[in-house]
Image: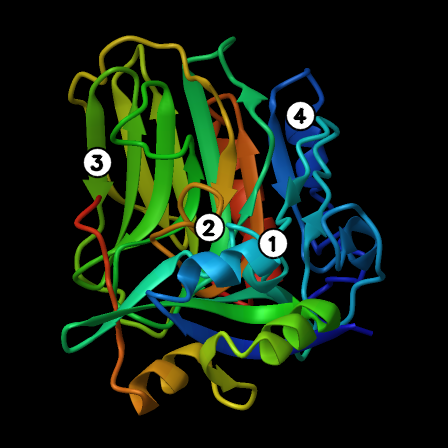
Amino acid sequence: MNQYATIIVTDANKTAAQELLGETFFDIPLKKTLSKYWVSSGYFLVEEYDAIVDSGLAFNINTEDSYFDCLSELNMTRIIKDED
Amino acid sequence: MYGLGVNRLGVTNTSGFVPSTLFASGEEGAWYDPSDFSSMFQNSDGTGAPAVNGPIGYIADKSGNGNHAIQATSAKRPTLRQAGSLYYLEFFGAQGLATSAIDFTGTNEMTVVSGAHKDIDATVVVAELSPHVGQNDGAFRLASVVTDAWRYTSKGTITINSSTPADYAPPSTNVLTGITDIDGDVNKIRVDGVEKASSTSDQGNGPLGNWTLNVGARNNATSLFLDGRIYGLVVRGAESSAAEIASTEAYMAAKTGVTL
């Protein structure tokens, strides 16, 4: 079973969240003013979704909106490395 | 019935051409077909029947080379979508698939054909051989680039780009073809069956490399995320003939809903 969600954690909670789900989660950086956040967006396994919800580590959990709509609502932008 | 001569198993189209014939002489490469439900699974270990509007963590290589593309991280798996008779993998800005290393060291040539759609104007990956084409020899990348263009990059030891004119503002759905011959200094990009840009600049020395193939993002979904769709992808370690390119593009156009 899967649960679609966009889940954002603060920079302070990134390590704990990755220890919970794995280091390939929450590896996409976001910013809002001077604060940095990390996001995973897509189909989580239900046990992964429940674990992060129960942990209280998430800054924001959105199961309704698209990834970009979610970021827009939170006034967050992706940090895109200058790469080609 | 699925129209356009395309069936749900993705085996035939109106021309009868099947991309697996491109690999009949032992060419290295891969062919991914999201319309073939028997080639996909929800999980990266090859379990979980695929479902429309569900994640795809494993798509089998139908070229016969065994270069299956997977995504082990659940939230980075693309979504299988259906639009009428067409099927595609949707990447919405945080997903990607990757293979194990594919050994292209036996060739200096490459032909890449994809049916792709982009929803945003950004530099994002459709397909990239190696974790970073600019940093690795013997690599290629088929990508969207700003502003409103598609680009094919290939590299022996020198990176060469061919970018289309800015004619492809999102949303844009196209059949994209990239062609490389490192020795012959060939780098071309075709869109919807027409050559749009080329370069004969020196690409340095071959061969192509033994690298992972990344689909929908760079380096196993760590950056340059596609916000769009992939209807199919054929990666062939050879420079296809004009007839082979025409057949492959016609096949991909039928899968993508594009009129050439």
- Dot in front, 2 or 4: 2
Q: Are marks 2 and 4 on the same chain?
A: yes
- Dot in front, 3 or 2: 2
**Sequence order check: which comes first, mark 2 or mark 4?**
4
* Distance from the alpha carbon under mark 2 to that under mark 4: 27 Å
What secondary structure is marked by label 4?
Answer: helix
List the residue tagged with mark 3.
B161
Q: Position of residue B114 (x, y in %)?
A: 50, 49
Say if B39 sits above or below B138 in the image.
below
- Is residue B199 at least partly visible in the picture? no
* Distance from the alpha carbon under mark 4 to that under mark 3: 26 Å
Location of residue B37 (image quadrant): bottom right
Mark 4: which amino acid? Phe
Q: Residues within 10 Å of mark 4 (few under 14, many from 20)?
A: many
Image side of residue B229 versus residue B49, left or right: left
Q: Position of residue A7 (x, y in %)?
A: 49, 75
Mark 2: which amino acid? Ala
User: What residue lies at 71% left-to-right and 34% top-to-bottom?
Assistant: B20
Instruction: Identify the chain of the residue marked 3, using the numbered disc in the image.
Output: B
User: What residue lies at 55% left-to-right and 54% top-to-bottom?
Assistant: A19
What secondary structure is marked by label 2?
Answer: loop
What secondary structure is marked by label 3?
Answer: strand
**Any mark on residue B23, and which?**
4
Image side of residue B38 versus residue B113, left or right: right
**Sequence order check: which comes first, mark 3 or mark 1?**
1
**Sequence order check: which comes first, mark 4 or mark 1?**
4
